[in-house]
Structures are given as C-alpha cells and as structure tokens.
Amino acid sequence: MYIPSKPFTCLDGSLTIPYEFVNDDYCDCKDGTDEPGTSACPNGRFFCENKGYVGSLIPSHFVGDGVCDCCDGSDEYETKTVCNNTCFELAQKTQAEREAQRVLHEAGVAKKKEIISKSIAIKSERQTHIDELERDLQSVENELKEKEELKRQAEIPENQAKEKHQKLWDEQRAVRETIIRNYQIRDMFADLDTNGDSLVSIDELQKHTELDLDNENEFTIEEVRTILGSDSVTLDEFNTTVFDQISNSYKRLPKPTTPIPEPTLDSIATPSSSVETSTDEKNMESHDETPIATSLEHEKHIHDDTPPEFDDETKQLIAIADQTRTEFDQVQGKVLDIKRQIEDLKKQVNIDVGVQGEYSAFIDQCFDYEEREYTYRVCMFKDAKQIPKGGGGDVAIGFWDAWTGPIENKYLRMKYVNGATCWNGPARSLTVTFRCGIEHKIIDVREPSRCEYAMIFETPSACDEKMAVTSSHSTHTEF
Amino acid sequence: MSRFFHLLNLIFILYILNIPPSENVDRNNFKTCEQSAFCRRQRKYKPDISPYEVDLRSMKTIRSGHLQFILHNTLKSPIKFQLDIFTLEHNSLRVKINEKNPIRKRYEVEHALVGEPKLVDVKLTNLDGKQVEGSFSKSAKFLLNAKPFRLDLFTNGIFVMSVNSKNMFNFEHYRTKPGTNESTGENNTEDNEDGMWEETFKTHQDSKPYGPSSIGVDVNFLNFENVYGIPEHADAFSLRSTHDTDPYRLFNLDIFEYDIQNPMALYGSVPYMLAHNEHATVGFFWLNAAEGWIDVNNDKLTVQGFFSTIASFFSTKPTADKNEVPQVSTHWMFESGIFDGFFFLGPTPRDIFKQYSVITGSVPLPPLWAIAYHQCRWNYNDEDDVRSVLNGFEKNVIPLDVIWLDIEHTHGKRYFTWDTQKFPNPEKLQDDIARYGRKLVTISDPHIKKDDAYQVYADAKALGYFVKTKDGADYEGSCWPGASMWLDYFNPDIFQWYSQRYSLENYKGSTGNLFIWNDMNEPSVFNGPEVTFPKDIIHYGGWEDRDVHNLYGMLQHMSTFQGLYNRSNGHIRPFILTRSFFAGSQRTAAVWTGDNAAQWSYLKIATPMLLSLSVTGFGFSGADVGGFFSNPDAKLLVRWYQAAAFQPFYREHAHIDTARREPWLFGPDNTRLIRKAIEQRYNYLPYWYTLFYKQEKQGIPPMLPLWANFPKDKNVFKTEDLFMVGNGLLVCPITEADTNQVSIYFPGENTIWYDTRTLIQYNGSETVLINVDMESIPVFQQGGVIIPKRLRRRRSSMLALHDPITLVVALDRNHEAKGELYMDDGYTYDYKHKRQMIYRRFIFRNNELHSKTLDFTGKFETDAWIERILIFGYPKNPKKVIINSGDKQAIPLHHYHAESQMLTIRRPGPLVASDWTLTIT
C-alpha cells in the first residue's frame, strides 16, 4: 500500500497524493489513510507493533498526545514522553489471565454438563409425569360424571320433600303473622287514642313528632292529615291506610308501658308474601343473637318463628343427597388438583432454560444478595425483590420478562420488568447479567440509573465450552 | 374511597393538561413584594415633591475627587444624611448616602469590590447655589441639583441618567421602637406601620429588632428603551416592565423547580443594570447585599420645566409636537445598608465591560480544561460507575475533560469525606482520571452535618464558628444531611479555617486533580423562611443576615478558592463552580443557572439568562445541558448539546431521579450528533481560551449580546435568541422541537457572515430564512475576523495543548480580517508570574496574512504550529502562496474551492510562537 517513490492513493480511492504527503502530519485523505503514523487525521488508525505481545490498531488521535497507549510506546516515539516497554509483562499477565479463565470455564463447563444431563432427565421425568397425570385426569373425569349423575338423582326426591315441608310452614306462619299484626294494630290504636273515643284524631297523632319525616319544621296539621287521610280514623281505617305508613317510625310516648321493639316490628310487619326459604337457619340464628327482645311475648314470637324440624322421611332423603354431594365434591377436587399439577409441570417444561437446558437448575430457585441496606432476592423466571434490612415492606423490582442477551448468546442476560413504580420515575426493572462461575451466586447488585437495577450473577450455566479448551495452539499464532 | 377518587381525578386532570405533577414551583413558599413589608412601603412611596434637599453650602472637598455634602429630609429635620461623591477613573462615578449620625451603624458591603476605586480630579462649575456641576475623567459629567435632591449624569455631553427625578428617594433612618423607654418624641404612627418591627411569613417570624431601615431610589435612563442585567432571574434579556407584576427581586434563594418568565428571585444577585441605545451604553450598580426589589417601567419623559433647560443634552431631540423622549425608569428598594451607587458612563459597550470589571473584578483566565466539556450526574454511584462512564467516552470517541461527583459520594453528606464503600480508593481514581489530563470535581456544600463524630463539625462547634441565632445560640437548620449548621465565613478566622479544609492533608482522599463545586450556598435551609436563613440571625460583627444575606454564597466560594489556591502554593489555577453569587463572585468562581428542567422552554431561556450574567461580569457561566429535572427526549438533548457547545460553561447534569443520559444512550445517530457538538467545542477551544484571556484583561465576556458588537444596530437591542461568541461567531441555538427553518437577522451594515458549515455567505442587515436539520448548529463567522481552531481529535483538551492550529480567516468586504490567539500551559499561573504565554495577532490585508506578537515579554515553549489556513470569501484561485518566517521561506500548496470561495493553504508550517507573513499572489 505504502510504496515510496510511487504516488499514494487513499484507500477509499478518493485522492492520489505524492508519496511525500504520506505521514507528513497533514491529513489529505478523507479516510485518514495517508497518516497512519501521525495524529493528523481524526479518523486514522495507528499500528502498534507491540513486539512480544499482540500488535494492535489504535485510533490515530492517541498518537503523540503524551499518553502511552501502545505497550511498546511506539505511539509516543516522536514526543518527549518516555514510555516503558510493557509488552512482555502484558503478555505474561494476559497469558495468566487467559489460563485462569480457561481453568474457570473448564471447571464450570463440567458442572454445566451435569446440569444439562440432569435437565434432560428432569425434562423427560416431567413429561412422563404429565402423561401419567393426563391419564389419571381422564379416569377421574369419568368418575366425576358418574358422581354428578348420582347426585342429581338423589336431589330430586330431596327437593320434593323439602318443598312440601316449606309450603306447610309458610301457611302456618302467614296465619300467625296476621294475628300478630292485628294485635299490634290494636295496641298502637289504643295507644294513640288517648281520649278513648275509638277514633285516632289529628291532635292525637300530632304528639308523635317522630313521625314527621321531613324533620325540617314542625309536625304540622297538614302533614298529620296527609298521614291520616282525614281528620280522624277508626280502627279499620287505621288498619288499611295508616298503620303501614307509621309502623316503622312509631314510638310510644313515655308511659310506663314496655315499648314495642322496632326492629322486630319490621320483620313482623313484613307481609308473609316474602317467602322465607328453607335455608333460613342463619337468619334465625342472627335473630337469636340480636339483643333486642325485651318482652316475653316477643321472645315467644321469635321461638315460634323457628320452622319445625323435617320429618324423618325427609331427613333421610337429605342425608342420602348429602352423601352424593360430598362424593362429587371430593372427585371434583381431585380433578382440579391434577389439572393444576399438569399446568405447573407444563409451565416448567415451557420455560426457556437455554439451548441445552443449561439454566434448568434455576427453575423454582431463589437467590439472595446481601448489601449494606438491602437484601436483593431474585426468584428465577418469577420475580425480583428488594428487601430492606431496617424493616419496612419488600419492593418488587420486577417480574420475569425475557432473555435479553446479545444476539450471539441471548442467555447471558435476563430481564425482570414492571416492578413497583418510582416516585417521579419509571417502574422498577432488573437486568441480570450472567458470567461463568463455579457456583450459582449473585456477585453484585447496583442501581446505575434510578430504579433500573443491574445484577451480576455467576453460574456454571454461563461457562463457555470454547473458552474451556486449552488454547496453546492459538497462543502461538497470537504472540 | 372518596380520597382515592379525588386523587384519581387529580391525576387525570394533570394527565390531560400534560402537567407533570412536580414541575411547578410552589410560589407560596416565597414572598411577594406585598408580603415583604419594606417593599410594600417603598413601592407605594411616590410623593409629588421630594422632601430631600442637599445643603450645597455644606460642600467639603475631602480630597481630590471626593466631595461631601449634607442631605436633609425636610419633613424630618433632625435626621441628617451624608452625601459623598467620588469621581472615578474610566468615566465612573460613585455616590454614597448614609445617615450622618445613625443610632446604629449601617452595613457597608465588604468583599465585593476588587479594591479601593481610583479617584480622578473633578472640575466643578456652575456653583450658583442651586446646582453643582462636575466634569471628570474622559467625558463624564454630573449635575447635582440641591432642591430637591436630584443627580443627573452625562456622557460625552449626552444626558443619560437621572437619580430621584421621580422623587422616590426614601431613606428609612434607624429609630427607636415606639413604646420603648428610649423612644423619643419623634415617634408617630408613621414609625409603627405594620411590618416595621416584626413580620411573619408562613410560620416564620422575623423579629426585626432594629426596625425599618430600607432605602428606595429611582434611577432613570433617559432616551433608553432597553435595560439589562440585575441577575439572577429566569426572564427576558431586555428587562420587562414590572408594571403588572412584582418587581424583579434580588434575594439569594433556592427556588425548587423554578418557573421561567417571571421576576422571582433565584440563587444569585447582582444589583447592576445596564442600559443601551444607539448612542451610548451606561450602567448603574448599587452595592447592597440586602434583599432588594427593582421595578422597571418603560415610559416617556415630558421635557418641560427643568428638563427643557437641558434639552440640548438629549441624545435624541424631543419630538416637536409631544415634547417627549422615551425613558426606562427604575425603582430600586433595599431592606437595609446604605445607598452606594456606581454610575458607569460608557459610552461604548466595551467601555462598560471595562468600567464594571475595574470595580468588581473580571473573571480570571480559567484552566483550559474548565472551559472544555464536563460530565456530571447526581450521582455517579461509585468508582466502578465513574470508570465505566469514562470508558463510555473512550468507546464512543467523545472528548471529555472533567467528571463530577455530587453529594452521594460523601459519607452521609459530610463534606470532605468519602463513602468508603463506594469510593474506597479516591486517590487512585483521580490518578486514573488524570491519565488523560482529566480532572475530578467534588461537591462541597456549606451546611455542616450536626454530628460530634464528624471532625469538621466538632472542630467548628468547639471553636464557635457557626452562624448564631439572635439569642446567641448556634443556628441549626436542616439540609441534605438532616440537622446542620453553617459556618460564618464573614469572620476572617473562619474564612481562613474553612479554606484550610481543602488542603491535601485535611481533605483526605483529595489530590491536585480534584476541584470543587459549592452548591446550596444561598444558603438553602430546608426548614428556614423562604428556604434560607432567618433574617434576624447574626453574623460576624453583629450584622444581621438581613444586611449581608446576598454575600453568604460568595464568601463560601471565595474561601474555597483560597483553599485551592493555597493547596498549590499559588501555582495552579483553582476551579470552583458556585450556585449562589454576588457582584464580585466572578473573581473566584464560575456559575451555573441551577436546577433547570428538561423542557424546550428551559433550553430557550438559558440564552437570555446567560446573557444577563455575561453583561454583569459573569462571563463564565452555563446551564445544565439536558435540563436537571426529568428526562429530555433525544432531540432536546441533542439540541441542548449543540447550543451549549457555544456557551461558556459546558456541563451535562441530571437529577438523581432521572434516567441515565450519557451521550451514547440514545442510539448511534444521536451519539454521533452529540459527539459532533462536543467536538465543535473542542475545535473552537483555542478561540474560547483567547476570549477568556481577553476577558481577564478587558472584562469583555466571551458570550455577548449582539448589541455589544453592533451597538448601533437598533434591530438587535432586544435580541435574545441569538448571541455572539467574541466578535467572530454568531450563534443561533435551536430551541424548539421539530424545527426545520430558522429566521435569522444578520446584524451590522456591510458585514458578511459565513455559515461555518456550508460556507454560504449572508449579508448584514438582512433577515434570512435558513433551513436546518438535526445536524445543524447555525453558527456564522463574521467577515473580518480570524478564528484559531484545533481540528485534530483528542481525548481531552489538555492532551491537545501542543497540537497544531488551523486559522480560519473570514474576509470582509475589503478583503481584510484580523484575530488573536492566546496560548499557555493551560493550568498554572506561570502565564502571569513568569510570562509563559503566547499572545499573537493575525492580520490579513492586501493579500498578506501577518502573525505578530501582542506581548513581547511573553514566551511559552511549544512546538505547536500552523497546520492549515482556511480563507473564506477569497475571490479567485491564486497563483502562488509564499510564507516567510525569519530567514526561512516556503511555498505551501493551496487548494481553491470556487463555489464556496474557500482557499485552503496546506501545511504552511510556521511555529505558532513565531512571526511570519503569508503572501498570496
């Protein structure tokens, strides 16, 4: 390329210059090729011969800047800077480092092979297990169908008997409730009819200001009349038009009489049309617990409200049906359990654990890293957390996303994303970078940018077979 | 549930309005004029007739150039004031007004002036008992009117400024508190106005034990329409009328997430205002460190009464029909101190820069690396992080000179310490950084963590070195480290002691390659009134913070400077960056515009903010590239790198909550654009360095408003979207997203401007639409100017120190040009003490380019040579180029590009230090 006495053509062909212009410390070629020995071209390359070590090209702007960049110091030959020749030491150091790396990778690769072979076994084990479970599932699902049919058959007579029983009970209760209501109407009417003229008049009702629902002003005559519908009412009229309006709010005026507890009025006054279902046991219990019953009559009424026991025949039908239901539920539980197991196994089988399954040992594994303030925990293929040592809640720094290594080997980096969001910042995320090591071990966790965590993880899974090969052959050619 | 709902609602509203929830300053934390009692009183003081009168019979000549008078307030006859007039060299006048016999001494600002101003003789005339007229210096004149007190200033016979022509001079003398034993009969309700004896703001009470003490004065700029200066405000360069807003406020404060386009106070204060028109440039500087407010109004002066008698002095004759001239009237109000006004009478922009720098000092030549590119972040986490960032610059071939460490590098915000887990070996780190000539800057804030185990605290505590409360206890407030105290730098012993903290013995882990950043020095006190000191705390000498507040930050960085200076026994130039500043700060520190935001509007406002700083002495200033708060998108970041490449202090910085934004994190295209922008800065460093040298000598800032170079071009008096670097480069920063065209007015009649990228020529006095893309940094070289550049690539500026020079000669219409080049070792004081420097002038005339020394005593050893000469606007391909240097002659090759009219001279070869002549035939 550089032939003295011949004009020089820039390597990009853009210009031909006299040979004296080569390395004359002036940049003529756009590609910088006329100045391989000076710093004149911003984009040039300088060749360090580096005898005893590896020759290398450095950017030509390193030439003559007072910094020794070549181990043979050739980049500073023309300056006052004194550079020691460090090529020999560098070669030795590099050789030692390379050997150390080789030993490490060799040991690592051995472990990696174990993991891979285990992985194959585990993978086939898992598949066998899945197959077994799927067979089990088939038979259990058949059983479930049988149990469902048995259940359906037992429930037909059971429901008929229960309905019959319910109907009877409803009728009895309707009768009783009419009686109670009439009693209450008479009681309230008597209470209201203070002058005993068998009529409830406006002035009598007006004393009951609790009935003034708008609460804003006085309980006016007009408002009372609206309730009564006329100036006075008889017991019958009271029954048909007034009682239902006031029974919820009505309070006895202070008199030495035991007041009728309101909450029960409610349930009593409810027309029997609201069918009480047979599953009313809970309601009854809660009634029992409600500490409002103060009168004997009322207690009696509550007790009376308990539906009578089923007859023996019905009881037996229920017991049979219960039995079929229990059996059905049990089988259904089994089905769900098998399905979940299959799903879990399939998930594990489907995790991308490397080309050869070298990362299979990570499945269901968590690793911790202790730092000054936090413990960092990564649960592989699941999530990552930051756990404060001084107490306080864990912070999710990401959920499993994907392998994100370089194209040559995407399994050198993985990412966890969408962790807890930072104030004024992004959602936390974690990048785990793998490098060869003898054990699975987190080496370092940092937060280079706010809420973007970076973890360095050593593992045999990241060791490289190529690096493990004794490289005496290549050493010879390079040095 | 309902709270949750409201929160959702709020978030939704913020979302649809696109307002980031934390982007706006909480204005309630800061006083309005109405909430600051003295401003409230002074602002409404507008009597029809001024009660102040000068007793001309009292005139005494103290010495040549110093006259003294008695001034009375005729409404308060017992109170006498002393009026001192000092006629100074360089067309400057100083006027002091103080109480003659105050019951308490009034504070006079120390530390701000560079020295005692030099007096010159004054020739007094017109002593008719009503007025005194004095002529002094080259072309300056004052006229003191007795009844009422009024002071008029003239330059070259032109009437330019008038003091108290609007009767707003109002001097609150110290008095005894009404109702106290000592109070005399003169008390009346006027002395007991609300806020005179105490003032409460939010939960903070200002006890005001000395009562009212403020001073107001109107200073009016006759025939001017534009005034500038009084930084620091995030506002227009040509100051806006405050008729409908608060006055501009001067009170050093840490305004969290400051808003732009308003007159609120910021981190620093320089009570110095300039006015410019096509006839003159003048300035008014009131040396006062208390809280200040300044109203600005553009109005008209009706020429009648007195003014009609001097109408002949107006630079523009009043219009016949209206008898009016424009003026900018300003109303200055300070809470305490004295009136100590400096009037600079120009009359040229260059004169003004010189005059102000003679009084307060100029920016000393910084180390070369300090004007190169800086990489900062809150925070580079640890040594590995720093190294990996440095490696990023190598890998991406981007030059870098300085890397910075913010507060997290310390052991729990204890300055002068290191977090030894993250920085176990800081000396080694600095040595590694220094391998490529690079430096480290660490932060050192003024709050001292209250912790007995912290040596700096324990020693200062034992020595009684902290600022005191009004009751004499050590004042305690909170800042980054929690409970903290603040050193009282006003005490010379403490100043000295603090500076010694920076010695290599005291600052463990520091080396000679470490420099300092003083932040939070307003000071910022998280739990203080307006996030700063209470005004009634006590400094050295018994002065309240009220009197000295705006000096505090300056005292800190002056002491820091002293420390770094002493560290090398005065051999190596220190570098300090400060956030808070006052007039005079420029002598020891660079400043930046504090915590801006990653928004286009903040990129845009950076230019007027930096211009305001430049014209008031702060030629070494910059804005955080990319914006401190939140995340810039790639386009904004690239545009910011491009704009700031042409602004004096060039540093990328980001908040701890932001995403990483080192130059290579936005994809290869943007990395390339950022690299190109930073390379532009490095290419022009010889020019920048020369401009910084001229600044030290002449006070001319490197970054300039257009009117500084084109004082007669009326079209540029308000220009703030363009600026100049020296007189050679016109820069149009692109400050809007997706811009593909910019409209540029080229200043100056008969000038030629060369697009530095395309070499397209533009004519002065014309407005041109220019197409731009992301590659474009519209920068134009003025015809007539020669600019030295270094076109070689290096890893840092210091590694390029002896690299060859390229001269870019841009010809004017007469085919002439001139320029300078300054060079030295880039970091020591040898250029001063041993004259180790090169200062050369290049002149192109009659087809000859000459290199001559401008300083015969200077000598700097360098093998730097001239590798290339580019001549823009050369009309034809010459036959031959000959270069003569001493007895040597050479015929370098040349290349002519007809289309762009560029002549390239290949390898002319002479040493930069030598005289030579290049002849083109």
Image (cartoon, coloured by chain):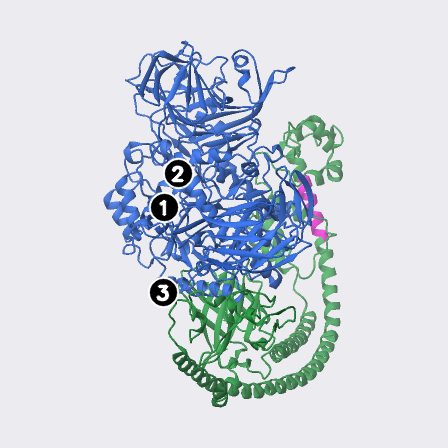
Chain colours: A green, B blue
Position in image of residue A51 (x %, y %): 44, 81
Judge whether B661 appears above or below B166 on screen: below
| Among numbered discs 2 and 1, the one appearing first in the sequence | 2
Residue at 46%, 32% (x, y): give it.
B272
| Relative horizontal placement of residue B101, taking residue B294 as reference (left or right) | left
Nearer the observer: mark 3 or 1; the answer is 3
Amino acid type for the residue under numbered disc 1: Pro
The residue wearing badge 1 is B446
| Among numbered discs 3 and 1, the one appearing first in the sequence | 3
Q: Chain of mark 2?
A: B
Within 10 angstroms of label 2, few (less than 14), some, or many (20 or more) residues?
many
Amino acid type for the residue under numbered disc 3: Lys
| Among numbered discs 2 and 3, the one appearing first in the sequence | 2
Q: Chain of mark 1?
A: B
Q: Which residues are magenta?
A: A174-186
Residue at 46%, 86% (x, y): give it.
A107
User: Mark 3 and mark 1, same subunit?
Assistant: yes
The residue wearing badge 3 is B428
Position in image of residue A350 (x %, y %): 63, 78
User: Mark 2 and mark 1, same subunit?
Assistant: yes
- Answer whether labels 3 and 1 touch (C-beta < 8 Å): no
SS for callout 3: helix
SS for callout 1: loop
Within 10 angstroms of label 1, few (less than 14), some, or many (20 or more) residues?
many
The residue wearing badge 2 is B361
